[in-house]
Amino acid sequence: LRYCNTKPGVENTPELEAEPNSPPVTRQSLKTILNTCSAGDFVKIQGWVRGLRQQKSITFLDFNDGSTFHKLPVVAAVKNAPKGLSMHCTVEITGELVHSPKKASTVELHPSEPIKILSQCDQTIYPLGGKIR
């Protein structure tokens, strides 16, 4: 298994205690991930849900953390997508980067553990636009 590390020669130190079967990873910015990481790397990201499409067995997210204009597609199984997931909520996602079948993006993130919602965005109070399907 490979771990994406931005500084050569520096060991990854987990910010939180990792599950026994998952590799330890540190939080990184989306800009760093898109520039230095490749398929097969395990990463931890924190940011906002910019697009959301939920189906029976899979949830698709467009993720952004503000470090770049680009987005990272996240493909999560229903077991890894929490019930309260909505547009513009703040999340933490840990998972593996894999090659994307779409040409628009080179990699997508597949969560290896459940997505954590850090804060909600109430759509009735803050009706922010976005893609919800």
Image (cartoon, rainbow, N blue to C red):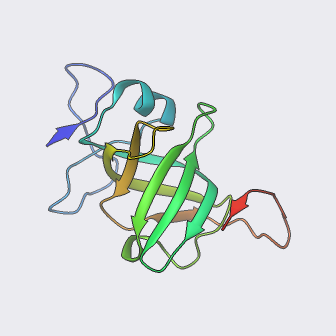
**Eyeballing the image, is 7 above or below 33?**
above
Image quarter of the N terminus? top left
Q: Residue at x 43, y 59 (%)?
A: 75
Q: Residue at x 15, y 62 (%)?
A: 20
Q: Residue at x 64, y 68 (%)?
A: 86
Q: Position of residue 70 (x, y in %)?
A: 58, 35
Residue found at the very far top of the displayed protein = 8
**Closest to the observer: 91 or 131?**
131
Q: Position of residue 9 (x, y in %)?
A: 19, 20
Q: Position of residue 130 (x, y in %)?
A: 74, 56
The answer to which image quadrant residue 97 occupies is top left
**Eyeballing the image, is 35 above or below 52?**
above
Q: Residue at x 37, y 77 (%)?
A: 79
The answer to which image quadrant residue 25 occupies is top left
**Eyeballing the image, is 85 above or below 105?**
below
The answer to which image quadrant residue 38 occupies is top left
Q: Is residue 44 left or right of 18 when viewed as pictured?
A: right
Task: Please give the count of numbered marks on the rendered protein.
Answer: 0
Q: Is residue 13 left or right of 73 when viewed as pictured?
A: left
Q: Position of residue 60 (x, y in %)?
A: 51, 61
Q: Is residue 4 left or right of 61 when viewed as pictured?
A: left
Image quarter of the C terminus? bottom right
Q: Is residue 26 left or right of 20 when viewed as pictured?
A: right
**Eyeballing the image, is 68 above or below 112?**
above
